[in-house]
Amino acid sequence: MSDVTQYAVRDGVAVITLNNPPVNGLGNALRAAILQNLKRAAADFAVRAVVLIGSAKAFSGGADIREFNAPRLKPDLPEVNDAQDALAKPLVAAIGGFALGGGLELALACHYRIAAPNAQLGLPEVKLGILPGSGGTQRLPRIIPMAEALRMMTTGAFISAEKGKELGLIDEISHGDLLEDAIRFSLNLLAQGKGPRRIRDMKPRLEGDPEVFFSKLRAQVAKESKGYPAPLEIVACAEAAATLPFDEGRKQERQRFDKLVNGPESKALRHMFFAERQTAKIPDLPEDTPAREIAKAAIVGAGTMGGGIAMCFANAGIPVTMIETSQDALDKGLKRIRDNYAATVSKGRLSQADMDKRMSLIRGTLNLGNIADADIVIEAVFERMDVKQDLFKKLDGVVKQGAILATNTSTLDVNKIAAATTRPEDVIGTHFFSPANVMRLLEVVRARRTSKDVLATTMKLGKRLKKVPVVSGVCDGFIGNRMLEKYVQQSLFLLDEGATPQQIDGALQAWGMAMGPFTMYDMAGNDIGWEVRQRRARERPDFVYSKVADRIAELGRFGQKTGKGWYRYEAGSRKPIPDPEVEKIIESYRKEIGVIARKVADEEIVERCLYALANEGAHILEEGIALRASDIDIVYLTGYGFPPYRGGPMFYADTAGLDKVLNSIQKFQQGYQGAQWKPAPLLVQLAKQGRRFNP
């Protein structure tokens, strides 16, 4: 018998224990062992009932995702479920920890279910762009109300064991030893003369007219799931459960599962799933590298960014001190934090007690000496090298030895900032994204002399703050902003040639971006980009960009905060409204540079902006700034509003085909400002070899 299961018989009850740590993933070996044990129990006359149990932490976490898009190995999970249905003896699932995806489908194919109080139940396949493919869409709406089943399946939300009992999914909650209670439960079934109770034989729990119910639901789900095909396919499967015999519904489910698992959206979402886990793997940083203790933190700067970072620490239970140069600025920063928390409380997403606890962890000061005992100090001051270097000199003389000195710079050279101290090995970049208390991305910028334990500590801290930390080397803009510069450069060139801000934003949003570049800059502040371009002009006079953005900024049109930018904004509203004045500015600039406007297709907008990202990403990979292409994808998926169902800029280029990307770039080289297109040697090499950025 395979060692991924254990088999024992007690008082006429066969106990099949899943033993495939860490989550009892239902890979081929475990499926085969379960099936073999079910047959063994069925053939043993001494066995009157069967209990299927996992560990205290996991009944089963579901399918092994690595088996998707690979030749299907027998037995598959539906075959195991068929054996469960066929078992003529009561079959009880004893659920500890969690039963997710295929794990819950395994439990649903059992005849009864008992669960530990802390058990979590869910069918989260939708988050990977697929649907429950082993009867989940057919069984769940037969055991709990259809509306609840669809909510679970279309959102991927988990429910507790108590909620499961309330809905009818769980028969009993175990408040003692789960296995002992499962055996007792099984013996009670036998004593009461109860045999198998198959969900497949139950009627779907749907009240009212199915046609009306599903018509309304389809419209709602279509509105909420733009770009994601799986939720609507789940609705179709649930409708089949309500209107067709079980076997016909399950056949439809399998067909729709196969369609989704081979589609680009699911492949992109699965790429994201694995890519996020890869970011912690740093080739020259052993997993056992000791980390420094972070018990106290300090933030220099109480502006929007500094306040957001302070909230991250308070949310993680770490006391944090904010420093400002004036009491007025400090008071405004603390009020902004309090208002942010209060808004979350008003929406029911945070209790008043939790808000009070978090606010108690945040204090303010005007005295740099009050942060001398901090374990990490993060500066969030104005984005100018001289300002940051001056601050780090002061921190070097105040903060205790062994503390990490971190800069939240978004573009500047961390090596130069570190050189302003006598301890460059303690200096690292921690580039948070605004709003810092919301955005998941944390670019961890490893400077030339950053020590390994500082890097390990910062990566660990990022996880503790519920961020996705991605390592970047030092270059202008690091990974995300360096690539963004090329993206924005092309969007501005497209304005020169005849497009409008609203057309460019609209084309990219229709493709899937959370917002277009001009909406983004209005939100961030056009004065910030203006400052960067002025620095570019001094440091890199060869860098060509359209000066139409400077014309906008020179008029004080800084975006939402001034009520005018690339768009205009009505008081109290963030909705961008196209502004004829902007069109006049653009037309005037075209005359100034001698360009006659042409009609620009939306497809060209998308290709130029997206391929600019991928091409610069290839340069970044070549230079070793990013460790792997999937890290670049995660930067854009978690920090720049890139649609998850596209998989990130490098994955998207892979999906399009690198030969196509290269051919398009070579075509762009013949057009307006074509000299700015320099195909990355890595892109050229991989395209010629028929390979991908992401292996």
Image (cartoon, rainbow, N blue to C red):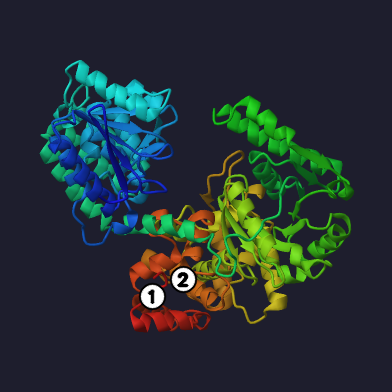
Residue drawn 43% across and 22% down? 175
Position above or below: 466 against 540: above
The answer to whether residue 349 is visible is yes
Residue 329 spot, x, y in % from top left: 80, 44
Position above or below: 647 against 55: below
Position above or below: 131 against 111: below
Q: Is residue 248 left or right of residue 664?
A: left
Q: Which mark is residue 614?
A: 2
- Quadrant of the drawing holding the C terminus: bottom left
Residue drawn 61% across and 65% down? 549
Q: How many neighbours does mark 1 have within 10 angstroms: few (below 14), some (14-19), or many (20 or more)?
A: many
Mark 1–mark 2 CB contact (< 8 Å)? yes
Q: Is residue 682 left or right of residue 459?
A: left
Position above or below: 645 against 61: below
Q: Which mark is residue 661?
A: 1
Residue 234 spot, x, y in % from top left: 26, 41
Residue drawn 16% across and 32% down? 200
The answer to whether residue 580 is visible is no
Q: Is residue 413 left or right of residue 326?
A: left
Residue 132 spot, x, y in % from top left: 27, 43
Nearer to us in this view, 477 or 11: 11
The three-letter amino acid code for the residue at tag 1 is Val
Nearer to us in this view, 685 or 116: 116
Helix, strand or loop status at disc 2: helix
